[in-house]
Image (cartoon, grey):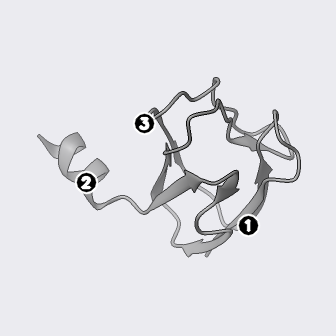
């Protein structure tokens, strides 16, 4: 039950129209961020420094990552490099 509650309150970034819906998000250390693909095409969530990488996300697929250290985390869609975003962890 605790995991479901944590997921329900996790910040969500939608993937729509070949873009990350929230291109920059600030969170605190210990936050899990969830990405949800609402496009009809495959997308990925791939960090620029190799820290995390989702598999190809189909329509309505989700990917979550738990940020445990402060920093600035740039990411992109590996299939569509013009799709970029940043998570700032404080």
CB contact under 8 Å: marks 3 and 1: no
Name the secondary structure under disc 1.
strand
Q: Is residue 67 visible?
A: no
The residue at 86%/47% (across/down) is 48
The span from disc 3 to disc 2 (Cα, nearest Å) is 15 Å
The correct choice, above or below, for 35 with respect to 78 in the image is below
**Where residue 64 sits: x, y (%)?**
49, 42
Q: Which residue is mark 3?
A: 60
Q: Quadrant of the N terminus?
A: top left
Name the secondary structure under disc 2.
helix
**Where residue 84 sits: x, y (%)?**
79, 57
**Where residue 44 sits: x, y (%)?**
68, 35
Q: Which residue is mark 1?
A: 71
The correct choice, above or below, for 33 with respect to 61 in the image is below
Name the secondary structure under disc 3.
loop
Q: Which residue is mark 2?
A: 8
């Amino acid at each position: 039950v605790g995991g479901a509650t944590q997921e329900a309150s996790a910040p969500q970034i939608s993937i729509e129209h070949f873009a990350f819906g929230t291109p920059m998000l600030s969170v605190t250390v210990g936050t899990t961020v969830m990405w949800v693909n609402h496009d009809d095409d495959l997308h990925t969530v791939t960090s620029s420094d190799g820290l995390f990488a989702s598999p190809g996300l189909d329509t309505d697929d989700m990917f979550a990552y738990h940020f445990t250290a402060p920093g600035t985390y740039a990411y992109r869609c590996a299939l569509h490099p013009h799709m970029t975003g940043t998570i700032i962890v404080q």
